[in-house]
Amino acid sequence: MNRRQFSQASLFAMSSGALSLSGCRENSDAPPIALPPFSQSTFHSQLEALRLAYEAKDQHVSSSLLPPLNESVLRERCAWFPAALPEELIALYAWHGGQDKEVDQDKFPFWFRDCGFISPSQAEREYKDIMSSYGQNPMDHELLKYSFPFAAFNSGWLVLPCKSQSLDPRFPRPVIFVMEGITVFFYSMQLMVDTCVEWVSHPQLNEHAQLPSDIELKIWQKHNPRIFADAR
């Protein structure tokens, strides 16, 4: 079983039927969850913690990360995208410009769960793939049209909505997973990285970057309270 197959199988098992990955919309009547304000310096510290967590597991990701991109260069390279880039994406690419797409992901796995960090040029290609597939669904077209793919693997994507979204209105910019449906995976970019740091740092992480599903879900819900529980 490869990484993607394991990931999807474990997600279905963890959700225990609570999460439908096909066209689900979150329950906007659920109690609000307060999020910390976004901070670029804090975000960069979190990303560094994730990099170091991989390195501590002998996953030498540092040499595969591309140089940082300043805001003007990033906006120029993302002129193809039909919305303004929010501060989270500007901060992400100011840290590093993605990961070299030619690297062996098994040896240099800078993953946000099971999607690898991608460059703006790769994001353009992935965006076209999303819009030619999932984006053809009228229910999801507007959401995906204005969502930027910053991580990808094997026809699965993590995207950040760059305009208001109805998938889960409690959160201004949740991280959304697109594969076999569309669902909120993390309540924010910062919470995504905090979750990933704890996953990668866990002593039971195996050589395939997998955790027992009950441990993975417990950490997931620690940083993203009630994640999946409110899905319809």
Image (tube, helix red, strand yellow):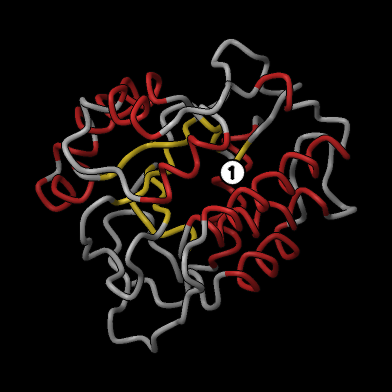
Q: Which residue is at 72% across, 24% downward?
A: 108
User: For numbered disc 1, what is the local secondary structure?
Assistant: strand
Q: Residue furthest left?
A: 138
* Badge 1 density bin: few <14, some 14–19, many ≥20, Cα 10 Å: many
Using residue 74 as the reference point, say whether residue 154 is left or right of it: right
Q: Quadrant of residue 207 in the image? A: top right
Using residue 109 as the reference point, say whether residue 173 is left or right of it: left
Q: Relative to residue 121, is residue 191 depicted above or below? A: below
Quadrant location of the N terminus in the rendered image: top right
Q: Quadrant of residue 137 in the image? A: top left
**Which of the pair 78/169 is nearer the observer?**
78
Q: Relative to residue 89, is residue 191 depicted above or below? A: below
Q: Which residue is at 35% across, 60% downward?
A: 173
Question: Residue 72, position in %: x, y?
Answer: 33, 30
**Which of the pair 15/208 is nearer the observer?**
208
Question: Residue 2, position in %: x, y?
Answer: 65, 30
Residue picked out by circle 1? 112
Q: Quadrant of residue 26 in the image? A: bottom left
Question: Residue 128, position in %: x, y?
Answer: 24, 25
